[in-house]
Amino acid sequence: MLEVRWKQRFENFENAFNKLKMVIEVYKKDNNNEIYQMAMIQAFEFTYELGWKTMKDFLKHEGIKVNMPRETIKQAFTNEIIEDGQVWIDMLEDRNLMSHTYSEENAKTAIDHIVNNYVPSIEQVHSYFKERL
């Protein structure tokens, strides 16, 4: 059952990541569009949530019990699921900031981080799981 769980979660993660990449492409054509900015932030939040939860389910499948995002990120780094643990911690902090406090300045900073820093790390985790299907 646990093996199936991480694979099901990965499917959802993959779908969310594909949507995030689509939104980024549209945003790059019109980066002043606030709707695209909001869509990117929302797509990132979904992708991030599904990413860390996929890691959590996979770790459980491997016999490692974790619950919270920070704990999951640390174990995923230790187990070489993710290459850059700090980027995932940064994602967690940006995600928390965006879901609890919205300001245009925070949004622009988060968007810059998403496009320039986070997508490569998400891609790396996506590839890790894709190879294990």
Image: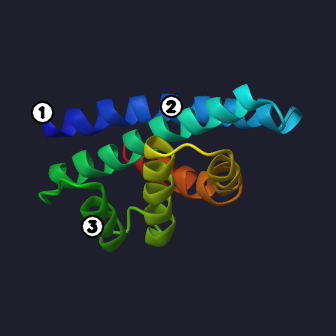
Closer to the observer: label 2 or label 1? 2
User: How many badges with numbers are in the image?
Assistant: 3
Q: Amino acid at mark 1?
A: Met
CA gap between label 3 and label 1 equals 21 Å
CA gap between label 2 and label 1 equals 23 Å
**SS label for mark 2:** helix
Q: Quadrant of residue 62?
A: bottom left
**SS label for mark 1:** loop
Q: Give percent across and percent down for residue 32.
A: 84, 36
Q: Is residue 1 above or below residue 118?
A: above
Q: Is residue 119 above or below residue 42?
A: below
| Residue identified by numbered label 2 | 16
Q: Amino acid at mark 3?
A: Gln
Instruction: First in sequence, mark 3 or 2: give its number.
Output: 2
CA gap between label 3 and label 2 equals 23 Å
Q: Quadrant of residue 78?
A: bottom left
Q: Residue at x 48, y 40 (%)?
A: 45
Label 1 environment density (alpha carbons within 10 Å; few <14, some 14–19, many ≥20) = few
Left or right of 6 on screen, residue 16: right
Q: Residue at x 49, y 64 (%)?
A: 90
Label 2 environment density (alpha carbons within 10 Å; few <14, some 14–19, many ≥20) = many
| Residue identified by numbered label 3 | 75
Q: Residue at x 69, y 30 (%)?
A: 22
Contact flag, marks 3 and 1 (Cβ < 8 Å): no
Q: Amino acid at mark 2?
A: Ala
Instruction: First in sequence, mark 3 or 1: give its number.
Output: 1
Q: Is residue 109 above or below residue 41?
A: below
| Residue identified by numbered label 1 | 1
